[in-house]
Amino acid sequence: MLMEIDWSALTDGVQPKIFKKGHVFYEQDEVSDYVYIVDKGRVALRIFTTEGDARTIITLDAGCIFGNLSLFDDRANSCRAVSVSDEVSIFILPKPIVIKKINEDMALMHNMLLESNRVNRILTKQMELMSFRNAECIVSFYLMHMANLYSEEHADGEDGHRKLTMKFTHQDIADVTGLSRVCVSNVISNLMKEGIIEKHEGTYILKDTDALHAKARV
């Protein structure tokens, strides 16, 4: 599970704003005047090539902060930040206020370091997967990651059966992992044939988390 970080020093007294899916908070290489904290929903950070190809670097959930890197180097943002759930609730904080509070509150600075550490670990794991692991390992790891964040015990009562509570497409996985949609579909199909996962009414059920864990090699 993601570590819970207390951002109340920044959000107390601030009313979050609601945005629909596809809202862009800032563009790649754009200088933003704000720092953002996810209250509810998900935001993806994506990079684009000059040819228009896109790669999702990381998906942020409730309690995550973004737009904060430029607080320390005063440079443009390196990714596009876009909402990817049907509705997101976001705290929007002017950078001068955030800087002032960080300078006055050591606990808040500690939280900033914790968040940076968490993101660095996720990015390092992604680099390892993309550099040294095959497609089956990458997709299995992603499914395990999703189960850790968005799952509940399946109603059939069988030990180890987890139902993913968030729906996603093969293209969603492809965007995050850098694999092709066809490749992701083939891996998912094989996992279903092996009885490790199944799909019911658009929702995936992990029937053998131990086997999936072994394929993810984590």
Image (cartoon, rainbow, N blue to C red):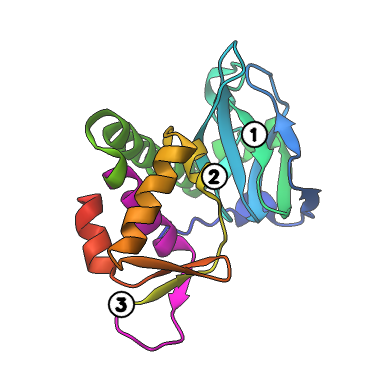
Q: Nearer the viewer, residue 97 or 41?
A: 41
Instruction: Give the residues drawn in magenta, as a range.
Output: 137-159
Visible in this render: residue 40?
yes
Whether residue 133 sits left or right of residue 11 in the image: it is: left
* Real-space CA distance between mark 2 and mark 3, rounded to the nearest whole angstrom: 25 Å
Q: x%, y% of residue 65? A: 57, 43
Q: Amino acid at mark 1?
A: Ala
Dividing the picture into quadrants, the one containing residue 105 is top right
Q: Could you say which disc has been placed on residue 81 in the image?
A: 1
Secondary structure beneath disc 3? Answer: loop
Q: Could you say which disc has been placed on residue 172 in the image?
A: 2
Whether residue 12 sits left or right of residue 19 in the image: it is: left
Q: Residues within 10 Å of mark 2 (few under 14, many from 20)?
A: some
Q: Residue furthest bottom?
A: 157
- Closer to viewer: mark 2 or mark 1: 2
Q: Could you say which disc has been placed on residue 160 in the image?
A: 3
Q: x%, y% of residue 162? A: 40, 73
Task: Say if 91 sits above or below 119 in the image.
Answer: below
Name the image quarter holding the N terminus. bottom left
Q: x%, y% of residue 67? A: 61, 32
Q: Amino acid at mark 3?
A: Gly
Secondary structure beneath disc 2? Answer: helix
Q: Say which residue appears at 46% left-offset and 72% top-offset.
A: 163
